[in-house]
Amino acid sequence: MSFKEKIVKEKIPLHVAVIMDGNGRWAKRRGNQRIFGHRNAIQAVRDTVEAAGELGIRFLTLYAFSTENWNRPKTEVDSLMSLLVSSIEKETSNLMKNKVRLQVIGETERLPQAVRESLQKLISNTSENSGLTVILALSYSSRREIENAIKKISFDCQKGLIDSSTINESLINSYLYTAAYPEPELMIRTGGEYRISNFMLWQIAYSELYFTDILWPDFRKEDFFEAIYEFQKRERRFGKTEDQI
């Protein structure tokens, strides 16, 4: 029996976030440059998006490029940006066919103009799609996101738009990049590393964390289904006791 057949439809998470890790190591093990791994990771993205759609998951966030990644060699960054544009163009028909809506979070103003234009075009073209919403975290830093939220809240306090006494979790949420989305119930990280890497630090406070040794280019639908199956076996208590649940 496949993991997909074991999944309980009534317990599907609303939002899943994925740290797509292992492209460089996958390429290195094959005697190739890191970009080779990034190119071969496209199928993993496609499989993950399709698997999430098949299960009826409503939101899927993919950590595609962090603010720290700008510190990588310029040749790799340039190749990644070029690959991103070409991938967007190639995947447009699949996204439309599967009624996938694309969104982006992060400091997108730092992205090259060609990337921004391609993203904006696809965001616009898929805006009316009613299926899975795929959120790309690009030039993203969770610490920077929280820092920017604090600055905006402070500015609005100074302008008299909000009273400091009203600041609470709900208000802070409304100033984050993810204000329009529910918090992830499950965070998946591939590549065998056991860390969060500055990804959605506020949003995953109560998310279930799932780590796998599979390098991202090898990640397929059945691997995603296995993560969902393992998620469903866990008891989420949110600080309550087992008896209260």
Image (tube, grey):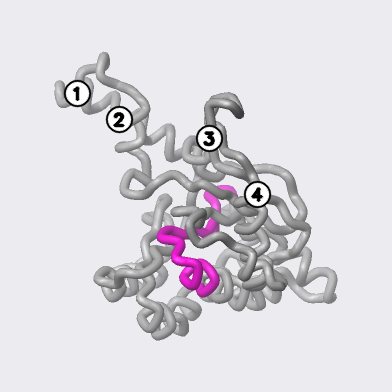
Q: Would residue 60 be found to the left or right of residue 233 on screen? A: left
Question: Which mark is first along the chain, 2 or 4?
Answer: 2
Q: What amino acid type should be assigned to the residue bearing mark 3? A: Ala
Q: In this view, does 97 lie above or below 211?
A: below
Question: Which mark is first along the chain, 3 or 4?
Answer: 3
Element under disc 2: helix
Give percent across and percent down for residue 40.
66, 77
Q: How far apart are marks 1 and 3 (CA)?
A: 26 Å
The residue wearing badge 1 is 162
Element under disc 1: loop
Residue drawn 75% across the image and 72% down it? 33
Q: Does the magenta stretch include residue 53?
A: yes
The residue wearing badge 3 is 205
Q: How far apart are marks 4 and 2 (CA)?
A: 33 Å
Question: Which mark is first along the chain, 3 or 1?
Answer: 1
Residue nearer the viewer, 85 or 218 = 218
Residue nearer the viewer, 88 or 44 = 44
Quadrant of the image containing the N terminus = bottom right
Q: Distance between the residues labelled 4 and 3?
A: 19 Å
Q: Distance between the residues labelled 1 and 2?
A: 10 Å
The residue wearing badge 4 is 233
Labels 2 and 3 touching (C-beta < 8 A) = no
Q: In this view, does 127 lie above or below 171?
A: below
Residue nearer the viewer, 244 or 210 = 244
Q: What amino acid type should be assigned to the residue bearing mark 4? A: Lys
Question: Which mark is first along the chain, 3 or 2?
Answer: 2
Q: How far apart are marks 2 and 3 (CA)?
A: 16 Å
The residue wearing badge 2 is 171
Q: What amino acid type should be assigned to the residue bearing mark 2? A: Leu
Labels 4 and 2 touching (C-beta < 8 A) = no
The region drawn magenta spans: 50-68
